[in-house]
Amino acid sequence: MPKYMFVYHRGSRPETEEAQKAAREAWDKWYTDMGAAVVDGGGYAGMSKTVSSSGVADNGGANPVSGLTIVEAADHDAACEMAKGCPVVIDGTGSVEVAELIQL
């Protein structure tokens, strides 16, 4: 079955302890709902740097990555349907880029 990367883009992390707990619970539920489709739960991304021919930018670019997960899905559309359940998509605080992981 094909594998897909879920690359998360989010503006900021929850600030209060209560909001962090609610966010963790939402992510745990989503992962549980996806079940065996989750191949690699990935994790949060730290501060990123963007490397280009003009040098290195310390700010992560216009839309910095905030995390990554790898899932299996029947096809790209099925992977996108799974991504719609992501907590940052549901609450409107971020987005998920869905790309097929092609083995070389």
Image (cartoon, helix red, strand yellow):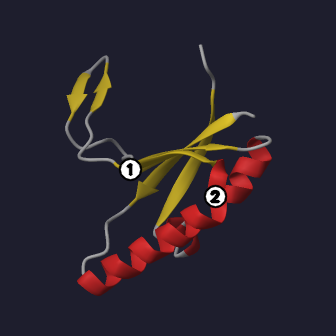
| Picture layout, residue 76 above or below residue 27 | above
Mark toward the start of the polypeptide (2 vs 1)? 2
Residue found 29% across the figure and 42% down from its top? 60
Which residue is nearer to you in this view: 23 or 93?
23
Q: How many marks?
A: 2
Reply above or below: 80 against 89: above
Which residue sits at x=73%, y=57%?
Answer: 81
Q: Residue at x 24, y 44 (%)?
A: 59
Q: Tell me the kind of residue under disc 2.
A: Gly
In x, y percent, where is residue 29?
A: 55, 72
Crowd tier of the residue under label 1, counting other residues whose Cα lies within 10 Å: few below 14, some 14–19, many 20 or above: few
- State the quadrant of the C terminus: top right
Query: Does the rendering let one see residue 85?
Result: no
Tell me: residue 69, above or below residue 84: above
Q: Residue furthest bottom?
A: 18
Is residue 79 something one can see in this rendering? yes
Residues under numbered marks 2 and 1 in contact, where contact means CB atoms less than 8 Å apart = no
Tell me the residue at 31%/74% (across/down). Answer: 14
Front residue (pair 82, 9)? 82
Q: Does dot 2 land on a helix, a strand or a loop?
A: helix
* Residue 73 image position (x, y, % from top left): 73, 44
- Provide the residue designation for mark 1: 43
Residue position for label 2: 35
Q: Is residue 45 left or right of residue 70?
A: left
